[in-house]
Image (cartoon, rainbow, N blue to C red):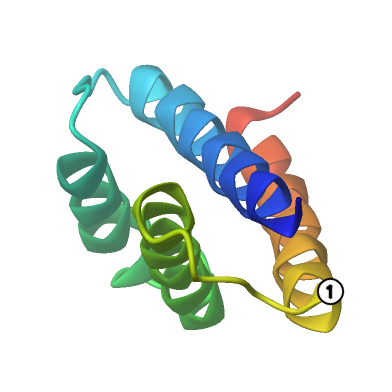
Amino acid sequence: MLSLATNRIYYSIFYAISAVSIKDNFSTSKHKKLLGWLYKNYINTDILPKEFGKMIYACFENREKSDYDFLFELTKEEINGYYELAKKFFNAVTKILDV
């Protein structure tokens, strides 16, 4: 059941990044391409903290593992940690989007 939370945390981050990319006139449906774009334009330029980049890639990998490896499971504490970092990320994205 916790794997569903892993999936939802990642996809909420993915769609937040997609909103930023649309603002910047960049569009792709490829997850790795979108993550690379964010890293190049927002993480490497220090617009967003490096901790977000590490968290986003970890969430991407965790989502893939939880979707395809039925034995993969994160603890409730690990998921809560990703959830808390995701909330900080959403606050930063809100400022970028000026909403």
Q: Horizontal and vertical percent for residue 79? A: 75, 69
Say left or right for 45 vs 66: left
Helix, strand or loop at label 1? It is helix
Quadrant (top left, top right, bottom left, bottom right) of the C terminus: top right
Q: Which residue is drawn at 54% across and 37% down?
A: 11
Callout 1 environment at 10 Å: few (<14), some (14 to 19), or many (20+)? Answer: few
- The amino acid on which the numbered mark 1 sits, given as a three-letter code, is Lys
State which quadrant residue 74 falls in.
bottom right
Q: Which residue is drawn at 75% across and 79% down?
A: 75
Say left or right for 12 vs 63: right
Q: Which residue is drawn at 19% across and 23% down?
A: 28
Q: Horizontal and vertical percent for residue 60? A: 40, 57
State which quadrant residue 82 falls in.
bottom right
Say left or right for 49 vs 5: left
Indicate whether 30 appears above or below 85.
above
Q: Nearer the viewer, residue 56 or 19?
A: 56
The residue at which mark 1 appears reads as 76
Q: Which residue is drawn at 74% across and 57% down?
A: 2
Q: Horizontal and vertical percent for residue 31? A: 26, 40
Indicate whether 95 appears above or below 3.
above
Q: Horizontal and vertical percent for residue 95? A: 70, 42
Q: Nearer the viewer, residue 31 or 67?
A: 67
State which quadrant residue 83 falls in.
bottom right
